Image (cartoon, rainbow, N blue to C red):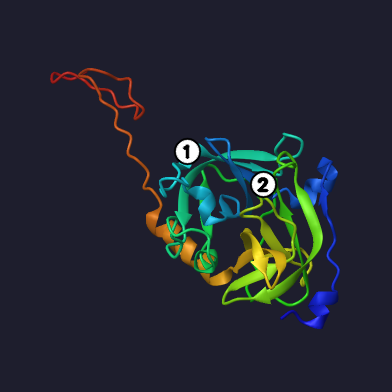
């Protein structure tokens, strides 16, 4: 059952951020596009790391991970123009998520992924958002997302409510739709927003249309460990040197056995 305070709280409507100035504070939230034309929402949590939902990085039919090079992150996309654009170099979906299981509460708990960008976005250009270290607190939250009908610009719901907690899953009355998967749920307890949860999808709870999101701290720590363990090693570059050649990057000059 919902508490009286939660039931009486008023959520605001979703609003498009129509100008670059309106979107500026939220430009570290971006659109994560795949090569098939689908997209989700993702958020910079470090200059080269984007947090999103795990189901966004899988091929739905095959249940296999998308190739990193087939994902593109467009930070702060507004009217088709991004604040920054990067190709993805590495994908790590949480090992607790089963892409063949389907959409249920067990999968929602682990529906989180971290992608590493091919090149960092300098923090003086875009300031990454911090992940909230505690449990999602009581009180209002906000959500910034993309979605069907607003795919080329950020939208923000300034205030929506936590309705229930279900074993590391939270139900919220936030306005989400296709494309909003992976969107950050912000708490504003300590000044600038911190990401307290990530949207997995929608459903019903106690007769209400709700959005479901997962609690983050332990999952993000797991994903960072996975990313460090699985980070591709740099490939060695080999240059073949012909006999008598002095055209190498080392500047070495080959001489005859009789001297120069």
From the image, tell me which residue sits under label 1. Answer: 69
Estimate the x, y position of residue 143 in percent, counting from the top left. 73, 59
User: Does 228 sit above or below residue 41?
Assistant: below
Q: In the rendered view, does 64 fall on the left or right side of 217?
A: left
Q: Residue furthest left?
A: 257
Q: In the rendered view, does 190 fall on the left or right side of 74?
A: right
Residue name at image x 72 percent, y 38 percent: 152
Estimate the x, y position of residue 164 in percent, counting from the top left. 68, 75
Q: In the rendered view, does 48 fall on the left or right side of 21?
A: left
The local crowd at label 1, few if under 14, some if 14 to 19, many if 20 or more residues have their Cα within 10 Å, is some
User: Of 68 and 35, which appears nearest the observer?
Assistant: 35
Q: So how many labels did they put on this image?
A: 2
**Helix, strand or loop for disc 2:** strand
Mark with earlier residue (2, 1): 2
One can see residue 197 in this view: no
User: Does 71 sit above or below residue 243?
Assistant: below
Marks 2/1: CA–CA distance: 17 Å
Residue name at image x 49 percent, y 38 percent: 70
From the image, tell me which residue sits under label 2. Answer: 30
User: Does 73 sit above or below residue 104?
Assistant: above
One can see residue 199 in this view: yes
The local crowd at label 2, few if under 14, some if 14 to 19, many if 20 or more residues have their Cα within 10 Å, is many
The quarter of the rendered structure image containing the C terminus is top left
The quarter of the rendered structure image containing the N terminus is bottom right
Number of the label disc, if any, that sits on residue 223: none
Residue name at image x 77 percent, y 82 percent: 3
Estimate the x, y position of residue 32 in percent, counting from the top left. 60, 44
**Helix, strand or loop for disc 1:** helix
In which quadrant of the rendered view does residue 39 lie? top right
Q: In the rendered view, does 167 fall on the left or right side of 257?
A: right
């Amino acid at each position: 059952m919902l508490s009286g305070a939660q039931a009486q709280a008023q959520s605001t409507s979703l609003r498009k951020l129509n100008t670059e100035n309106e979107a500026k504070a939220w430009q570290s939230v971006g659109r994560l596009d795949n090569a098939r034309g689908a997209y989700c929402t993702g958020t910079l949590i470090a200059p080269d790391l984007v947090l999103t939902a795990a189901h966004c990085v899988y091929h739905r039919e095959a249940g296999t991970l998308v190739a990193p090079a087939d994902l593109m992150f467009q930070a702060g996309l507004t009217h088709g123009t991004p604040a920054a654009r990067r190709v993805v170099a590495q994908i790590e979906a949480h090992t607790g998520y089963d892409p063949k299981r389907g959409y249920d509460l067990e999968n929602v708990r682990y529906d989180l992924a971290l992608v590493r960008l091919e090149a960092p976005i300098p923090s003086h250009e875009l300031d990454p958002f911090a992940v909230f270290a505690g449990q999602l607190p009581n009180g209002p939250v906000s959500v910034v997302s993309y979605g069907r009908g607003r795919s080329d610009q950020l939208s923000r719901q300034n205030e929506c409510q936590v309705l229930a907690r279900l074993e590391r899953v939270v139900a919220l009355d936030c306005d989400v739709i296709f494309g909003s998967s992976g969107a950050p749920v912000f708490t504003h307890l300590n000044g600038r927003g911190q990401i307290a949860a990530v949207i997995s999808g929608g459903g019903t709870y106690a007769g209400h249309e709700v959005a479901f999101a997962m609690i983050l701290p332990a999952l993000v720590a797991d994903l960072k460990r996975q990313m460090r363990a699985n980070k591709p090693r740099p490939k060695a570059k080999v240059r073949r040197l012909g006999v008598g050649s002095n055209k190498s990057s080392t500047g070495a000059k080959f001489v005859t056995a009789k001297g120069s």
